[in-house]
Image (cartoon, grey):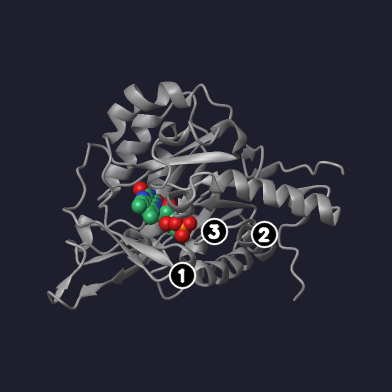
């Protein structure tokens, strides 16, 4: 059987294959290295970085839900300075696309994090998390407003020399309006979806299970929602789209590719099966070989409607 060509192009970014480990579920890469050779993956997105280190929310921060999990980690991270000193030197030795997920609580913070990473070798792209609360607008998430999402995109682009992927939140009325605004602002690619907001109550105590009350739902429970959003956004913009949401098996990833995503990210699956990324990649390779698909990009958007 001929080996299919799994290379994918995301604007200025070329990946050796379409399988990427999602932010917040793969640490800074090294944590999984004894189980998954990161060099085999299309890319890894590291945990979201802010300007200063952040401890995150009080526990409990995670609860299992039917076919998924709810997390309120609160974007705990080591901050950009420690990342550059302690994590990037090892990441730089890898032969995979290292993408750095960034966030801020103000436009200035987004700009400052991007600027701190500017000119740095070994970073293939920035992924901008716009699901974060905006302190200047009463805590409303940046990504819920198309104009504010565009402003974040412009600020990051002004402060970086790297390709910019903007990661969309599904907690909106019309994700296509945000996608178009971000595209018009100059983003090179989009990734979607981030988690869906939810809550769980312990009826014995009458208390919300998460100390933060609400959290972000991820895992198979969100897959059909994510898939439909990807399907719609792909048809609303011209820039490449990365599909995320409940991808556990090769077949799940194939659905996102058929909906029009050029690549996929695997998140919660890493907690259930640390080798999920590689097994999904092998499944995609096998599917292409069996179907006689020569280039994975021939499968992108190849949907029988
Ligand atoms: C524990 C946890 C931490 C996460 N941290 C981040 C983060 O720092 N930045 C970000 O953009 N997304 C973060 N996410 C969202 C994931 O990258 C992904 O978009 C989401 O979980 C949906 O994909 P999945 O169903 O495959 O997990 C996190 C998700 C989980 C479960």
Using the rendered view, name the quadrant where residue 12 is placed: top right
Closer to the chain start, of discs 2 and 1, is 1
Label 3 within 8 A of ligand 1 by Cβ: yes
Above or below residue 131? Residue 157 is above
> Badge 1, how many Cα within 10 Å: few under 14, some, many 20+?
some
Note whether residue 150 is visible.
no
Real-space CA distance between mark 1 and mark 3, rounded to the nearest whole angstrom: 10 Å
Say what secondary structure mark 3 lies in.
Answer: loop
Instruction: Find residue 221 and name its label.
Output: 1
Task: Identify residue for label 2.
Answer: 254
Real-space CA distance between mark 2 and mark 1, rounded to the nearest whole angstrom: 17 Å
Note whether residue 37 is visible.
yes
> Badge 2, how many Cα within 10 Å: few under 14, some, many 20+?
many
In the picture, the quarter occupied by the N terminus is top right
Quick check: marks 2 and 1 in contact, CB under 8 Å?
no
Instruction: Find residue 247 and name its label.
Output: 3
Label 2 within 8 A of ligand 1 by Cβ: no
Residue at the image position 63 percent from the left and 44 percent from the top: 11
Residue 185 appears at what percent x and percent y? 48, 53
Residue 162 appears at what percent x and percent y? 50, 35
């Amino acid at each position: 059987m001929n080996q299919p060509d799994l290379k994918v192009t995301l604007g200025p970014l070329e990946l050796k294959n379409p399988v990427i480990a999602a932010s917040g579920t793969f640490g800074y890469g090294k944590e999984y290295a004894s189980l998954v050779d990161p060099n085999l993956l299309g890319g890894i997105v590291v945990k979201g970085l802010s300007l200063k280190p952040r401890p995150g929310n009080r526990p409990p921060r995670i609860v299992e839900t039917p076919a998924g999990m709810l997390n309120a980690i609160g974007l705990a991270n080591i901050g950009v300075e420690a990342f550059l000193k302690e994590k990037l030197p090892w990441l730089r030795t890898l032969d995979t696309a290292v993408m750095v997920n960034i966030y801020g609580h103000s436009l200035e913070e987004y700009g400052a994090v991007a600027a701190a990473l500017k000119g740095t070798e070994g970073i293939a792209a920035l992924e901008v998390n716009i699901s974060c609360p905006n302190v200047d607008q009463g805590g409303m998430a940046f990504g819920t407003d198309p104009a504010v999402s565009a402003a974040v995109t412009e600020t990051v682009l002004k402060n970086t020399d790297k390709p910019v992927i903007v990661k969309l939140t599904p907690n909106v009325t019309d994700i296509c309006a945000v996608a178009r605004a971000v595209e018009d602002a100059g983003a090179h690619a989009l990734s979607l979806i981030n988690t869906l907001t939810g809550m769980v109550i312990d009826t014995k105590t009458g208390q919300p299970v998460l100390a933060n009350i609400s959290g972000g739902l991820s895992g198979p429970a969100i897959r059909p929602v994510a898939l439909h959003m990807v399907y719609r956004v792909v048809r609303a913009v011209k820039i490449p789209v990365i599909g995320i949401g409940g991808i556990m098996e090769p077949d799940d990833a194939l659905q996102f590719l058929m909906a029009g995503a050029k690549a996929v990210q695997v998140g919660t699956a890493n907690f259930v099966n640390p080798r999920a990324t590689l097994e999904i990649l092998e499944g995609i390779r096998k599917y292409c070989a069996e179907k006689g698909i020569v280039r994975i990009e021939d499968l992108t958007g190849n949907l029988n409607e």
